[in-house]
Image: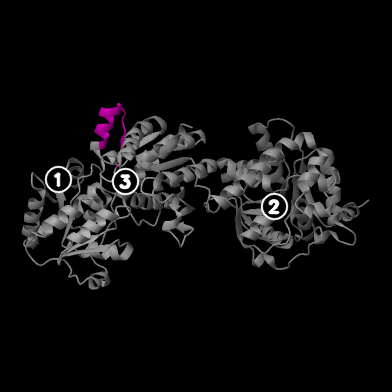
Amino acid sequence: MSLLGRLEPRLGEGKKLDVKAGVGLKRGMVAKSKSVEVLGVGLMATDYHGAVGLVAELAKREKPGTVTACNTHLVALARHQPDFGRVLGGFDLLLPDGMPLIWSMRRNGADLQDRVYGPYFMEEALKNLPRPWRHFFFGGTESCLRQLSEAARQIQPDVEIVGTLSPPFRVWTEKDEEGFAETIRKSGADFIWVALGGDRQERWVAKNLPRYSRGVFIAVGDAFELLAGRRAFAPAGMQKAGLTWLYRLWQEPRRLFPRYLKFNSLFLFYTFLDRWLGTGPKGVRAPKPGKQKIAFLGCRGVPARYSGFETLVEDLGARLAERGHAVTVYNRSHLYPDRPAEVRGMRIAYLPSIRTKSLETISHTLLAVIHAAVRRFDVVYLCGVGNSALAGILKLAGSRVIVNVDGDDFRRLKWHPFAKWWLKKSEKWATKLSDVVIADNHTVVERYERDYGFKTTYLSYGTPKRSNGGGEETLKMFGLKTGEYVLYVGRLTPENRPDLLVRAYGKVLGDWPCVIVGGAGYEQEYGVSLHQMEGNRVKLVGPIYGGGYRELSAHCGIFVLPGTVEATRLVLLDQMGFGNAIVWHDCPATREVIGKTGLAFGGEEPERDLAEKLTVLIGDPAERERLSKAARARAEGSYSWEKVTDRYERIFQELTTKK
């Protein structure tokens, strides 16, 4: 009996083979084809005819191409094992071989009626790929390959089969692999059909592709056995209902039950995770060779809209993404209603949180840790020492963990006693549970060594090159003149001491206004008290981001840092980058950053000292100019984001090499 005679009864009464189990082809789809993601794997939204056209286009290139028919097993495995995710991410074309994948793609906007089932796709390709392109069959037994070759000639009498190869049933040596490659190369094949089963065929293609200079390698699973007539196709109704796996389980229960139990369960689990724990990063974006898959957790998100950690994540993450790392940032949903899928090359995941001062960070980070654990990133960067208790979950999932402890957080005035206790305990947990602890200031490095006998890694931040030019729309909005106002930028919290600046400014001589930029967040009572202190020359303008922030920073006459938090303040580095004259409250951490480039105040009466120094500096443009140049020079010479990123890359490489 012919191949057509063997297949048609299984497709239903009166239905021809090229209709594919009763669903007609949409001609011309190749022009409309696009990638649609399922569990982070980019599958091509196409049909049989469109897929054949895409494969024909691959064959015209002057380099080898790769194609595979992806079922739920492969998609779940790519999500579960990052190394296999990178294998699939390197393929040129991933075809949706499975109705559950089609249903998921429809939810994501794809207009598809049927899957591209590997055996039917191979039959369609053999029938319709233009001649004289040549085919090679790799995999299966000798008898299977003989029957497959016969079936292929029934499908297309003019097909040119230039070789078949049944590899030995054992672990293949390098000599074996080179022998396979030599045979395939000598055949001059344009299309190399590979059937090794499971994920073995995709791994084999990815590993051996460098041996070839041409040819399209197409992994098609059990297509050889089915097209050769050695095993029956599932009935058409079961195929369309997405139950091909059940028919296969009935055929080979002992061999397939463990596989289906594991990977069908994983597919359902990850689908649930993505739908109910937020929008995950789209796509298996494989890092470039030698690079890592990195996640940032614990901050509010990017673009930066709140504090130093967000600025760190945006500036560092964007540079890492530009260098070829696959970077994901976990954002808090309520802060980003517009929900961009990507920011400066970084993929964004959105998760909810419990919106209270003490629980917002830890609740969001807990969900992000669960999400990241199942995605199994190479490196996870935890922002904030209070999140360090969660590092163990990530370590169990196989990720390397970096914790940035951000100074003496437990000493900050905003925390109640339990939060302070938690933050202090978290410091010790960070030394026990993480792979690397980052401290942004030598004062913190010394304290960890003194208190815990633990050597943290000192690594500060960079400052972008800033321009003093730009628009003046924000200045006009608040009635400001270029170079004639004092600026504060930061959260309105007790440890940042904006109240000290507001009180001192009442004693400053002159008519310059003092502009206070920032929001109170959960410190509403403190924010109200500041507004009650606000005078004619003090303007509390609320939080301002982006271009408005840059305008206010670029045109101010003096920037004031009134707080004494023992950590490196990113806003300070940023203002140094703008080349601003800076007045700062004397403390070891700030002294380390700014050196001799600013004007310090303090002593027993810091309020009076600040008022006096601002009065003198407002009246001395030459001194302001000197401080401005010194600040910019120190920022450019000592705080380079490129050097910081270089250092992080070395740390990532060392961590992942140890795995």
- Residue 368 drawn at (x, y percent): 47, 45
Q: Which residue is mark 1?
A: 586
Q: Quadrant of residue 109?
A: bottom right
Q: 96 or 495: which is nearer to us?
A: 495
Q: Around disc 3, counting alpha carbons within 10 Å, would you say few (fewer than 14), some (14 to 19), or many (20 or more)?
A: few
CA gap between label 2 and label 1 equals 63 Å
Q: Which is nearer the N-term, disc 2 or disc 3? A: 2
Q: Residue at x 27, y 57 (%)?
A: 465
Q: Is residue 45 left or right of residue 307?
A: right
Q: Around disc 1, counting alpha carbons within 10 Å, would you say few (fewer than 14), some (14 to 19), or many (20 or more)?
A: some
Q: Which residue is mark 3?
A: 643
Q: How is the image coloured?
A: one colour
Query: Which label belongs to residue 100?
Result: 2
- Residue 343 drawn at (x, y percent): 43, 57
Give, as a single range, the part of the protein colored magenta: 444-459
As helix, strand or loop, the secondary structure at mark 2 comes to helix
Q: Amino acid at mark 2?
A: Pro
